[in-house]
Each structure stands twice: as C-alpha cells, then as structure tokens.
C-alpha cells in the first residue's frame, strides 16, 4: 500500500533535517493557541509531530485513493452540460475524502476552523497530491483563495467565508484572466460599479478560469472610471448566483480533471475585498505569488511521478539480455532526472520558508501595529528574498519538470507514446506548468531584478556567514566558483548599461543564478548527509559547464541576433 509521503526518502530527509522553528513560532504566534484548541501544539516538537502526522494522512490518501483513480479521471475529464460543470467521478470522490479528512483549511487560523499550517507544509502537501493526480491539485491548491481572504478582508468577511472554506462547504477560484488580458493583467476590462446603496456589480467576461465553477471567486475588476493601468483595479469576493453564467469549458491537452471555464458576469453582486484600487498592486500579486509557489510544487510532484514510472520501466525492461537501466545512456538520464527533482525540491522548501517568515511577520504587524519597528527590517529583507526566490523557483521547477517528463517518456520508448502507461499523462499534464500563473519568460523578468540589484548575493552571503562548509570544502569551492561567474555576469551587464542587452541575456543570467543558489542549497544539504554530498558533486559538475557557456555569451557583447532577428523571422529568400 503506497504512501506518497513515507515512500519518498527525499521529503523525509527534508522534514527530518530542516529547521522550521522560526516558521512555526511565527505561524503559531508563539504557540498562543495552546489551551484554547485541543489540536493546537504546545511547542516546536509538538508542532513538528503534527506536521508529520498530517503529511502521513495526505500521503496515504494520495497513494491509495487518488493515484489509482487518476487514469480514469484523465479519460473522463471534467464535462460541461446544461451550463454546469460536472467533475469526473474520481475527482468528486477525491474532493469528498479530502473534505472528510478536514484538509481544506490548510493555512487558515484555527479560530475559523482551519488547521493553521505554514506554506512550507502546504507546498509539501501540494507536491504529494500532484504526484497522485496533477488535475486534483488545481482544486486542492486553490486554498490560496481562502488564504487571501484571511489576509486582506475585514473580520465580518472572514467570519462569513473562512469557516465555509475550512469545512469544505465551498471551494474557490481566482477570476483574473480575460480574452484580451492574459499576462498583462493591467489590461483587465471587466467592470465593477457601485450602486447608490453601496452594492458592487460585475459586468464582463473572464476566460481560462481554473475551477471557475466554484462557489466563491475572487474577481479582479476595473472599479475606477477613467483610471487606466493597475491603480484602477480592485479585487472582489463573488459568491456564485444566477447572474454569472459559465459559457463553456476548455478542451485541454492535459490536467483534464481540472475544469477551465469561461465566465460571463451580468450585473452580478459582489463584495469589495480590502481597499479600492489595491486589487492588482497588492492583493492579486499576493494571490499570484502564492499560486506560483503552488504550481512549482505541482511541477515537482508531476516530475516525481514521471521519474518513478521511468525508473520502474527501466528496471523491468530487458534488452540485449539486461535491464535497460544498466546502459549508461539510460542511467545517466535517470540520475540527472533524480538530482534535478531534488534540486527543485530543496529550492521549493527554501522559498516557502522565506515566504512563511515574510508573510507571518506582516500579519503579526497587521494584528498588532506596535510590532512594526521590531519586524520592519526583517520584513523588508524577506520581502526582497521572496521577490527573487518565488519567480526563480517557478522558473526552475517548471522547466525542470518538463525536461524530466520528456526524458521519462523517452526511456519508455515506443510504449511511452501510448496510453497504456501513465508517463504520457504526466508528459501532457506538466506542459501547462511553465505557462499558467505566469510563463517562464515572465518569471525571468520577475527574478532578474533581485539578481541585478544584489538580493541574490545578499542571500548567498548569509549562507556563507551562517554555516561552516569546511567539511565539504572541495565541493563548496566549486559552488563559490559558480557564484564568482554569476557576479562577473552581473557586473558586465551593469557596466554595459544597455537595457536591450540586459533583456536579451536575462534568461542566461537567471539560469546562472538558479544553478548557483541550488548548488549552495545542495551544499547545505550535504552537511547533513553523505548521499547529498554525492548529489551536490554530480549537480555542480554540469552546472559549471552550463554557467560557463552562459557567461561567455554575456561577456561576448555579440549583438548579431538583436540587430538581425527581423531579417530572419520576417523575411524569406
């Protein structure tokens, strides 16, 4: 009987070795809930025990209930009939068991019926669920809707909505995208108007809305007449009624159990969330950053599933009188896949810890403004870190996941191209991850600022100052060599002072930053495990070659493609 938590030695390594004391102390408000709720932990050890038991429950449900139903969910898909979305049978059953296990108020405070878990544990849970069925994650992972309401709504709204999310009575969606406003959310045109009684009404169309059939949606709309751009946008809580019609659902390449809807709002009543004009610049960006962390976890989960399919097949498949895993071409692929996944996972946990610290300090200041001075500098620092690590994480994990799934299908050979094996489903499901919630190209733009302005160097300085790498000096010296190349590339870009050249090499610079950061994180892991020393060594060796190639391109000052690309793509012979 597989348990997708306890059978994953790398997750176990991290949960048993990571220091979550600061994260849990902040999330638990210094364990102030003890004595008020029977399930509230008494101290750090008790909190960690709760975390492990919760992951074990999720691992059991994912491995023994969700995963066996995933092929049927993919085959059946979500359906649209008479204006309503019908979940696949396996999806509906999975939602029911997750509700019964009381797993739908994951990060919400206990006073509203939640289980008050930090984002780091949420990321772990999302990975585990995604390994079982990537499309189910798009429902389970939308708990960010309730998290956003918890952060930014008034107490009345919290009391009316959050307990319903936690009990599983309602699920959520975020209605952001429009036919003419995809990545450019400042172009949103759906209108919100306030009547004489102070009631808001929504009019317009939203497209590509994941789980748009949900009872509660956070809808981004233009609330300020004559005010263009992001400052004219507010965020609204909408509870589904007859004034919103689902016009259709999309027929997709993958994640078929997850309905993607087109919505028509016709004078639909809604409630303002927070303050006017803050919808995009604060609330939606917070919501999307949470979603990007979730998609990164989804990508790691799908990659883990695909790797395991490839590993199993390579051990079972006999060619030329031996298992194909014995051929160097195959075991090199398997090794690189495994290490890439572990790289994504260690970056994911680092990012989620940073986000946990930042957000919980911000929430504590909101709850008690007298703490502002105490946390001001740390909030600023961790905000910089989160601003860098979140897009860096989504970029790396989703690109990594696509490569892992590609190679997993390749290891299967011809049968991988058939529907007999799960690997083709993973191959289809992973493809969306580096597209939705911001494409890889947008993540590069998001991460570049933190690279150029020195935030990445600031974090690397902390790793060096707070840890003794002497026991693995031979490996860590190579990681520091990657850092030297990163800083050389940054210095050259800044010295050149050409925004076009900087934009042209943005992805190369971000790739160097990702390789460098993950190398440092692997070195931190290597201080706790002999196996991780081997992982670090094998990761860093090709990283040196990748970084050198990217650095040479940056230092070359070659402008040919910038100057000549139109002659190539716009002209024929």
Image (spheres, helix red, strand yellow):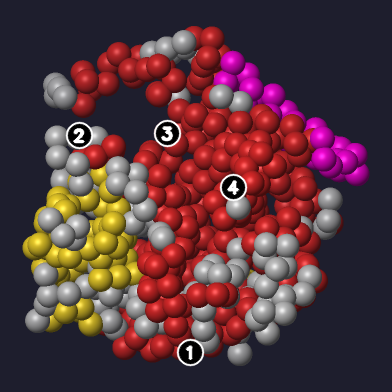
Which of pointers 4 and 1 indicates the residue nearer the eye? 4
Labelled pair 2, 1 in contact (Cβ < 8 Å): no
Magenta span covers which residues?
Answer: 465-491
Residue under the image location 22 percent in, 50 percent down: 221
Mark 2 / mark 4, whichever is N-terminal: 2
Q: CA distance from mark 3 to mark 2?
A: 23 Å
Mark 3 / mark 1, whichever is N-terminal: 1
Q: In the rendered image, is residue 524 in sight? A: yes
Q: Is residue 56 left or right of residue 101?
A: right
Residue under the image location 40 percent in, 23 percent down: 504
User: Does the stretch in magenta take in 317?
Assistant: no
The numbered dot on residue 100 is 1
Dot 1 surroundings within 10 Å: few (below 14), some, or many (20 or more)? Answer: few
Q: Which residue is mark 2?
A: 228
The numbered dot on residue 369 is 4
Q: What secondary structure is the stretch in magenta mostly built from?
A: helix
Seen as rendered, the residue at the extreme front is 197
Which of pointers 3 and 4 indicates the residue nearer the eye? 4
Q: CA distance from mark 4 to mark 1?
A: 38 Å
Q: Which residue is mark 3?
A: 445
Which of pointers 3 and 2 indicates the residue nearer the eye? 2
Of residues 133 and 56, the one nearer the viewer is 56
Of residues 129 and 118, the one nearer the viewer is 118
Residue 362: % across, % down: 57, 49
Label 3 residue SS? helix
Dot 4 surroundings within 10 Å: few (below 14), some, or many (20 or more)? Answer: few
């Amino acid at each position: 009987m597989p348990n997708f938590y306890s059978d994953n030695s790398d997750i176990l390594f991290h949960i048993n070795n990571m220091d979550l004391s600061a994260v849990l102390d902040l999330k638990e408000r210094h364990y102030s809930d003890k004595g008020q709720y029977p399930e509230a932990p008494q101290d750090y050890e008790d909190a960690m025990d709760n975390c492990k038991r919760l992951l074990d429950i999720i691992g059991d449900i994912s491995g023994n209930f969700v995963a066996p139903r995933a092929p049927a969910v993919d085959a059946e898909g979500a359906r649209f009939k008479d204006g309503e979305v019908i979940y696949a049978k396996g999806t509906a059953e999975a939602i029911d068991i997750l509700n019964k296990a009381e797993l739908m108020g994951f990060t919400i405070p206990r006073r509203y019926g939640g289980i008050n878990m930090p984002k780091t544990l949420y990321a772990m849970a999302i990975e585990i669920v995604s390994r079982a069925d990537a499309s189910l994650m798009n429902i389970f992972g939308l708990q960010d809707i309730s998290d956003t309401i918890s952060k930014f709504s008034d107490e009345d709204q919290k009391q009316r909505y959050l307990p319903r999310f936690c009990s599983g009575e309602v699920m959520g969606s975020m209605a952001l995208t429009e036919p003419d406003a995809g990545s450019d959310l400042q172009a949103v045109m759906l209108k919100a108007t306030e009547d004489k009684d102070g009631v808001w009404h929504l009019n317009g169309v939203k497209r590509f809305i994941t789980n748009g059939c949900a009872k509660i949606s956070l809808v981004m709309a233009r609330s300020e007449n004559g005010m263009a751009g992001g400052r004219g946008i507010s965020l609204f809580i909408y509870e589904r009624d007859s004034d919103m019609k689902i016009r259709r659902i999309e027929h997709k390449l993958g994640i078929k159990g997850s309905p993607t809807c087109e919505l028509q709002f016709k004078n639909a009543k809604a409630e303002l969330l927070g303050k006017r004009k803050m919808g995009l610049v604060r609330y939606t960006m917070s919501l999307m950053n949470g979603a990007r962390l979730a998609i990164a976890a989804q990508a790691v989960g799908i990659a883990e599933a695909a790797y395991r399919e490839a590993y199993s097949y390579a051990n079972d498949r006999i060619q030329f009188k031996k298992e194909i895993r014995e051929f160097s071409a195959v075991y090199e692929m398997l090794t690189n896949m495994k290490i890439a996944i572990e790289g994504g996972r260690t970056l994911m946990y680092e990012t989620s810890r940073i986000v946990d610290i930042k957000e919980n300090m911000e929430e504590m200041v909101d709850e008690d403004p007298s703490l502002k001075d105490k946390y001001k500098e740390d909030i600023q620092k961790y905000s910089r870190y989160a601003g860098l690590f979140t897009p860096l994480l989504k970029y790396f994990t989703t690109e990594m996941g696509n490569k892992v799934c590609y190679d997993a299908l390749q290891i299967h050979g011809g049968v991988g191209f058939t529907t007999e094996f799960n690997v083709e489903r993973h191959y289809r499901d992973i493809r969306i991850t580096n597209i939705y919630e911001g494409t890889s190209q947008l993540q590069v733009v998001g991460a570049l600022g933190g690279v150029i302005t020195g935030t990445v160097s600031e974090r690397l300085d902390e790793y060096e100052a707070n840890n003794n790498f002497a026991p693995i000096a031979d490996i860590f010296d190579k990681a520091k060599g990657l850092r030297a190349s990163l800083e050389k590339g940054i210095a050259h870009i800044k010295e050149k002072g050409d925004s076009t050249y900087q934009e042209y090499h943005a992805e190369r610079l971000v790739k160097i930053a990702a390789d460098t950061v993950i190398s440092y994180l692997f070195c931190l892991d290597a201080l706790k495990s002999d196996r991780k020393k081997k992982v670090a060594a094998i990761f860093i060796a090709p990283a040196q070659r990748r970084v050198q190639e990217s650095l040479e391109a940056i230092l070359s000052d070659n402008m040919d493609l910038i100057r000549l690309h139109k002659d190539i793509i716009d002209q024929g012979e």
